[in-house]
Amino acid sequence: MLQVENLVAGYGKVQVLQGISLNVPDGQLVTLIGSNGAGKTTTLRALTGMIRPESGRVLLGGKDIAGMPAFAITKFGVAHSPEGRRVFPTLSVADNLELGAYTRLTGQRPKGDVKGDIDKMFDLFSRLGERRNQLAGTLSGGEQQMLAMARALMLQPQVLLLDEPSMGLSPRLVEEVFSIIGRLKKEKVTMLLVEQFAAAALEVADYGYVMENGKLTVHGPADKLKKDAAVRAAYLGAAH
Ligand SMILES: Nc1ncnc2c1ncn2[C@@H]1O[C@H](COP(=O)(O)OP(=O)(O)O)[C@@H](O)[C@H]1O
Ligand SMILES: [Mg+2]
């Protein structure tokens, strides 16, 4: 269980997150939706230690990891598929996946079967299997998105943070990415999914939070949020 309590974070003097609190229970898929600039990416960055929160707590299995550096947070099993994918372009697909298991290979997390898990990723993301020796920089946007997700999964995460996996993808690939997220949900991978594509996110999620200007304004079970008039008007393109 990931519990965020009164998290305040930003960039230098610019405070973006105004004290947010949210929970991601084990085995659940929670989505964070909101317009461009609301603070969704900043939230994930603060959770993974890419930026240092000013105050608040980030509890993972009851332990406060807020303020720890990113490399330390990774050891607790928080995996991040970042906005813009950030695959290592000059490394092969297989090497990108192996790097996702870095803390397993260095003994900071249980090693398990890294090679077997790479094969599992090639089963889950068949497009990657066909391109295992190709340099990641030569993949299409959709393939890079899948690689970023697969690399994060190689940590065998306690919680997987996904930032805008649908961004810039064709409708067909968006569907493919969401169907994979649905499969991960069935396998009880604990996930926090950030999306601007609110309709698809609420369709697959258990629970949702709406972010506006660095604050969480509405939250509830995803099927209830889908029917909420204000949420529909603002994020689901519904008539008023
Ligand atoms: N590296 C940065 N330095 C300064 N301000 C930033 C930086 N990244 C984002 N911001 C600002 O933080 C706010 C929230 O951005 P972001 O978290 O990226 O929103 P979202 O992911 O919801 O679109 C925006 O006003 C944005 O301009
Ligand atoms: Mg963002």
Image: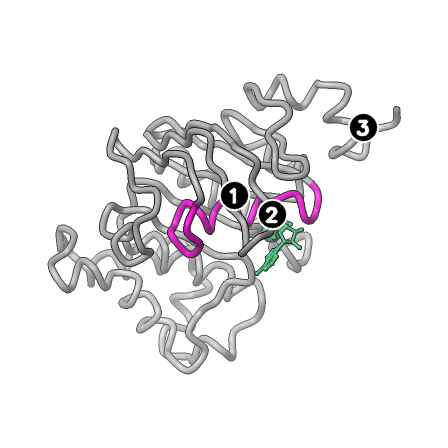
Amino acid type, callout 2: Glu
Tell which tag, 1 or 3, sits nearer the viewer. Answer: 3
Does the magenta portion include 48? yes
Numbered range of the magenta stretch: 35-53
**Label 1 – label 2 distance at C-alpha:** 6 Å
Is label 3 in a helix, a strand or a loop? helix
**Label 2 – label 3 distance at C-alpha:** 23 Å
Instruction: Tell me the residue at 64%/26% (across/down).
Output: 217
Q: Position of residue 230 (x, y in %)?
A: 76, 22
Q: Which residue is mark 3?
A: 233
Q: Which residue is mark 2?
A: 175
Amino acid type, callout 1: Ser
Q: Is mark 3 within 8 Å of ligand 1?
A: no
Instruction: Tell me the residue at 24%/34% (across/down).
Output: 63
| Corner quadrant of residue 98 | bottom left
**Label 1 – label 3 distance at C-alpha:** 26 Å
Q: Which residue is mark 1?
A: 179
Crowd around label 3: few <14 · some 14–19 · many ≥20 (10 Å): few
Instruction: Tell me the residue at 45%/69% (across/down).
Output: 87
Is label 1 in a helix, a strand or a loop? helix
Mark 1 in CB contact with mark 2 (< 8 angstroms): yes
